[in-house]
C-alpha cells in the first residue's frame, strides 16, 4: 500500500486504543490509516468530522459506531455492531461483518462487501445498509426507517415486527418475520435501489432481480385482534 | 461474557506449538473472562490398559505418590497420573477431584487471570493435536477451581461454554437418574453430562449436539472436544459470539477474532461465523458433520 504524505498512520501495535480515538476526536477531518487493528474493539468510534479513515485488517466490536460525517473503510472483517447508531457519513467493510451490523443507525451508509451475520439492521432508524453477500437471521428486526439492500440471501425471520424501513433482497429469503410481507417493486423503488447500489459501488446488478419487502402494518398499529401476538 | 478458544492442528508440524498458540489465544480473551481460566489439551496417549487422570487436590503440599499408579507430571495443584482403576482412586481419596480422564485428554483449570493461569501451568510447553480453552466471567455459580471450565464428564470428552442455561437444575436431576455423576452445581457441567449421556446412548457426536437444541434452554455457544477433534454449536438465537477460521494448517474457533489473529497465517485464513443451530465438527480425516 502506498501511503501519501498527508496520511497519518496510527499503529495499534504501539498506540493504545484510547490514544487512537482521542487523536481522531481531536481532528476535525483529515486522512488516517490504522494499522495492526488485530480485532480491537471500538476502533474509530464517535467521530464528528470529515475524516477519511482506512483500517488495514480486522476489527472487533462496534467499529465506527455513532459516527457523523466521517468515512471509514475496513480492509478486513468487522465484529459485532459495526456502524451501530451511525448518524451520517459512510462505513465500508470489505470483508464480512458479524451480527447487529448497522444496529439502530440513524443515517449515513453502511456497505458490506461480504456477508453480514444475524440481526443486520436491527432497529435501524434511517441508516441505509447495502450488503453484497447474504445476511443472517432476525435481520431488520423492528426496523423503522432507511433501506436494507441484500444482494445475496436473507436468513430466517426477516423484518420481524417491521415498521417503515424498506427491504430489498435479490436472492432467497429463508423466512419472513411477523408482519413482514413481500410488496410490489414500483418505479420509485427501482430508482431508490439503483441509487443505493450506485452509492455502494455495485453497478453490475440488474435491479429488477430484487424483491421488495415491507410492513403489512397489521402489528404496530395496535389492534385488539392482535393482542395474542404480544 | 466468557471467552472460548479452540485450536485443531491439521498439520502435524503445528502440534509441538499447540500450547504456545492456545496460551496466546486465551490471553487475548482476558477481559471476556477475568475470573478463571482453563484448557483441555489432547496429547501423549496413555498406554493400553491404563487411564490418564488429571487430578486436583486443594492442598498444594499433597503427596501425589500416595495415589499410586504412575505419576507423570505435577502442575500447580494438578497432577497427571496413569492409573488402572479410576474408581479406586476416587474411593480412596474422596477429597481429590478428577479434572479429566481418558487416553489423551488433560484438563487444567484455576481461578485467576488467563495470563497468570498460563504461566502457573506452563501452558507454552504443551504439544498436542488439539486443545480447547475458556476464560470465565461467572454468572450461574461461584468462582472456584471446580466451577471453571472445561468440564469433563466422560472419557476424553470435554465442553466449554459461553452463555448460561436456565433449565440445568431439572436436567441435572434427570441425568442423575440416568446414572450421570456431578462434581459441582454448575450449569455447564450439566451440558457436558448431557452430551456424555447421549454419546453413551449411542449417538454420534453431531447427533448428540443436535439433541442439545431441544434439551437445553438458555444461551450458549458450545465447543466440545473429543479424542478425535472438536465441534461447535450455537443456540437458535445465537446471541453468544463465535468465529471460525481455517487454513491449510489449522482450524480455530474463538469468541472473537482477536484471539485468532495471534495465530500464524491468520490474516489469510478463511473466516466465518457459525450459523445458529448448526453443528460444525472437525475430526481426524476432517469429516464434516
Image: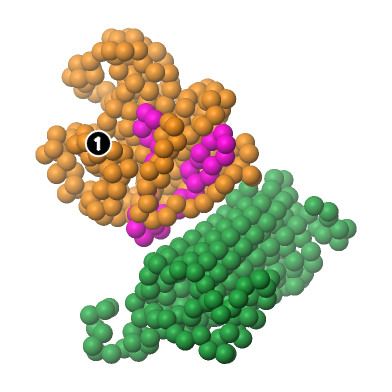
Chain colours: A green, B orange
Query: Is B74 in front, or is B18?
Result: B18
Q: How many marks?
A: 1
Q: Is residue B233 left or right of residue A194?
A: left
Provide the secondary structure element on which disc 1 rests: helix
Instruction: Answer few, some or many: residues within 10 Å of disc 1's Cα (few below 14, many 20 plus, some between 14 and 19).
Output: some
B212 in magenta:
no
Q: Residue furthest right?
A: A5
Q: In the rendered image, which quarter is residue A118 located in?
A: bottom left
Residue positioned 32% across, 43% down in the render: B206
A218 left or right, relative to A96: left
**Residue found 68% across the figure and 56% down from its top:** A75
Eyeballing the image, is A48 above or below B114?
below
> Percent from the top left, x then y, of residue B250?
53, 36
Out of A109 and B143, give the one closest to the viewer: A109
Point out the image quarter for the C terminus of chain B: top left
Report x, y in % for residue B165.
28, 51
Circle 1 is placed at which residue position? Answer: B199
State the image coordinates of residue A123 (x, y, percent, origin top left): 46, 75
Q: Is residue B97 visible?
A: yes
- Residue B145 figure quarter: top left
**Res A42 seen here:** no
Looking at the image, residue A213 lies above or below residue B57: below
Q: Is residue B83 left or right of residue B267?
A: left
Query: Which residue: 18% across, 47% down?
Result: B171
Q: Nearer the viewer, residue A213 or B125?
A: A213
Look at the image and give the residue range highlighted in magenta: B225-254
Residue at the image position 22 percent from the left and 80 percent from the top: A228
Residue A196 in the image: above or below residue A56: below
Magenta span contains residue B238: yes
Amino acid at each position: 500500500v502506498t501511503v501519501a504524505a498527508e496520511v497519518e498512520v496510527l499503529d495499534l501495535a504501539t498506540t493504545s486504543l484510547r490514544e487512537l480515538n482521542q487523536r481522531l476526536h481531536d481532528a476535525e477531518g483529515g486522512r488516517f490509516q490504522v494499522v495492526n487493528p488485530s480485532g480491537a474493539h471500538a476502533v474509530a468510534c464517535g467521530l464528528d468530522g470529515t475524516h477519511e479513515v482506512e483500517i488495514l485488517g480486522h476489527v472487533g466490536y462496534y467499529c465506527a459506531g455513532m459516527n457523523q460525517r466521517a468515512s471509514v473503510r475496513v480492509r478486513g472483517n468487522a465484529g459485532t455492531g459495526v456502524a451501530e447508531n451511525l448518524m451520517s457519513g459512510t462505513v465500508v467493510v470489505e470483508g464480512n461483518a458479524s451480527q447487529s451490523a448497522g444496529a439502530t443507525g440513524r443515517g449515513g451508509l453502511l456497505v458490506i462487501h461480504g456477508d453480514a451475520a444475524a440481526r443486520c439492521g436491527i432497529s435501524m432508524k434511517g441508516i441505509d445498509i447495502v450488503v453484497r453477500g447474504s445476511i443472517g437471521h432476525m435481520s431488520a428486526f423492528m426496523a423503522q426507517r432507511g433501506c436494507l439492500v441484500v444482494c445475496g440471501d436473507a436468513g430466517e425471520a426477516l423484518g420481524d415486527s417491521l415498521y417503515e424501513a424498506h427491504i430489498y433482497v435479490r436472492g432467497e429469503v429463508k423466512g419472513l418475520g411477523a408482519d413482514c410481507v413481500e410488496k410490489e417493486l414500483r418505479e420509485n423503488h427501482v430508482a431508490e435501489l439503483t441509487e443505493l447500489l450506485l452509492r455502494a459501488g455495485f453497478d453490475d446488478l440488474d435491479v429488477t432481480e430484487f424483491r421488495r419487502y415491507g410492513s403489512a402494518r397489521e402489528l404496530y398499529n395496535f389492534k385488539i385482534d392482535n393482542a395474542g401476538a404480544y | 461474557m466468557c471467552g472460548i478458544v479452540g485450536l485443531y492442528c491439521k498439520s502435524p508440524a503445528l502440534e509441538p506449538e499447540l500450547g504456545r498458540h492456545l496460551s496466546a489465544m486465551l490471553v487475548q480473551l482476558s477481559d471476556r473472562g477475568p475470573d478463571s481460566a482453563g484448557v483441555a489439551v489432547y496429547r501423549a496417549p496413555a498406554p493400553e490398559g491404563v487411564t490418564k487422570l488429571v487430578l486436583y487436590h486443594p492442598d498444594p503440599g499433597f503427596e501425589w505418590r500416595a495415589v499410586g499408579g504412575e505419576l507423570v507430571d505435577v502442575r500447580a495443584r494438578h497432577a497427571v497420573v496413569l492409573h488402572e482403576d479410576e474408581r479406586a482412586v476416587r474411593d480412596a481419596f474422596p477429597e481429590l477431584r478428577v479434572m479429566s480422564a481418558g487416553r489423551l485428554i488433560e484438563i487444567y483449570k484455576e481461578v485467576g487471570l488467563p495470563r497468570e493461569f498460563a504461566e502457573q501451568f506452563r501452558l507454552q510447553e504443551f504439544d498436542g493435536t488439539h486443545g480447547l480453552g475458556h476464560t470465565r466471567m461467572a454468572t450461574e455459580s461461584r468462582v472456584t477451581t471446580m466451577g471453571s471450565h472445561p468440564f469433563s464428564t466422560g472419557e476424553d470428552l470435554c465442553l466449554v461454554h459461553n452463555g448460561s442455561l436456565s433449565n440445568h437444575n431439572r436436567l441435572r436431576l434427570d441425568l442423575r437418574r440416568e446414572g450421570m455423576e456431578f462434581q459441582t452445581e454448575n450449569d455447564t457441567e450439566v451440558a457436558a453430562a448431557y452430551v456424555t449421556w447421549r454419546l453413551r446412548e449411542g449417538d454420534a457426536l453431531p447427533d448428540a449436539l443436535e439433541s442439545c437444541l431441544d434439551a437445553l434452554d438458555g444461551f450458549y455457544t458450545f465447543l466440545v472436544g473429543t479424542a478425535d477433534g472438536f465441534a461447535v454449536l450455537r443456540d437458535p438465537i445465537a446471541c453468544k459470539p463465535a468465529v471460525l477460521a481455517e487454513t491449510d494448517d489449522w482450524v480455530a474457533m474463538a469468541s472473537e477474532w482477536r484471539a485468532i489473529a495471534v495465530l500464524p497465517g491468520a490474516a489469510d485464513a478463511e473466516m466465518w461465523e457459525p450459523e445458529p443451530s448448526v453443528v460444525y465438527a472437525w475430526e481426524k480425516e476432517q469429516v464434516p458433520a
